[in-house]
Structure formats: C-alpha cells, structure tokens
Amino acid sequence: MTFLEDLLNELPDLVSRMRHYDVRHVSLKNEMGAIALTVTATPCQTAHGAPAITVEDIPVLSPEMGRFRQNGLSEGQTVWTGEIIGFVETGVLRLPVTATTNGILGPAEIGDGSLVGYHDILFRIHQGA
C-alpha cells in the first residue's frame, strides 16, 4: 500500500484521537506529497435535524512544552479574548497563555509549577448562553 492508502485506512482512528486530545489540525508531509486534516469540535450533524445549540467550555491549550505558571487569576473571573491568564516557561522563555474567548475562567487543569506538554489543556473558559 502507498502512504496515502495507509493514511486513509487509518483516518477514522486518527480523527478519533484528534478529538480525544483536542487537536484541530494536522499536516503530514513526505517525499511523495502532503496532506492536511482539520476536524471540527464536534461531529457534523446529519440532515435529520438542526444541530442543538449548546454552551461549551472552550479549552485553553499550552503553547509549548515547559513549566506552567499561573497569572494570579481565580476561577470564576471574567476574562477577555487575548488576556494573559498564565505562562509556560521553557528554558529562558516565558510564553504567555491567553484566553481563547470571552467568558468565565474555570479552574486551572494543571497545578502551578507543573510540567506541561504541547497543547495540554491548562484551563477551560465557560461561554455564557
């Protein structure tokens, strides 16, 4: 089988893993070509009915591997898109973790000073209805 045929056979498992780890986009490239895959937050609705309107907690992901540091904000505080809500220290760099949407900040998913991986969920922001 070719690289593309193997990938297409594994696509359902890959999409499931992407959703499980909250990865929205993957690009794969080799000497034969490249492919990019983007998934939505939830599976698409069928034509049998309109999608239900839900309020969802939006994850805030770590921008890099390193040590997580809180920014003095508390659970339940209102945050605005782009507001710095924490940091990830990697070597001498201190990378800001910013709110991905306006809403109410949930508790930190990882303790202050803990090691985090790339795209680990650090917070969730609750959007109002």
Image: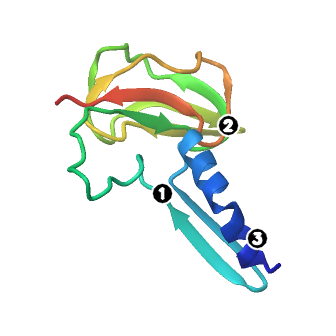
Q: Looking at the picture, how far across and down is residue 114, in whole percent?
A: 67, 21
Q: In 3D space, how far apart are the residues under numbered discs 2 and 1 (Cα atoms)?
A: 21 Å
Q: Amino acid at mark 3?
A: Asp
Considering the numbered disc 1 on the image, is that residue within a helix, a strand or a loop? loop
Dot 1 or dot 3: first in sequence order is: 3
Q: Nearer the viewer, mark 3 or mark 2?
A: 3
**Could you tell me which residue is drawn at 37 percent across and 54 percent down?**
44
- What's the mark number on residue 117? 2
Q: Nearer the viewer, residue 124 or 81?
A: 124
Q: Amino acid at mark 2?
A: Gly
Q: To which quarter of the image does residue 113 belong? A: top right
Q: In 3D space, how far apart are the residues under numbered discs 3 and 2 (Cα atoms)?
A: 28 Å
Residue assigned mark 1:
39
Considering the numbered disc 3 on the image, is that residue within a helix, a strand or a loop? helix
Residue assigned mark 3:
6
Q: In which quadrant of the rendered image does the C terminus lie?
A: top left
Q: In 3D space, how far apart are the residues under numbered discs 1 and 3 (Cα atoms)?
A: 19 Å
Q: Looking at the picture, how far across and down is residue 99, in whole percent?
A: 37, 36
Q: Nearer the viewer, residue 32 or 45?
A: 45
Q: Nearer the viewer, mark 2 or mark 1?
A: 1
Number of disc labels? 3
Q: Is residue 68 above or below residue 23?
A: above
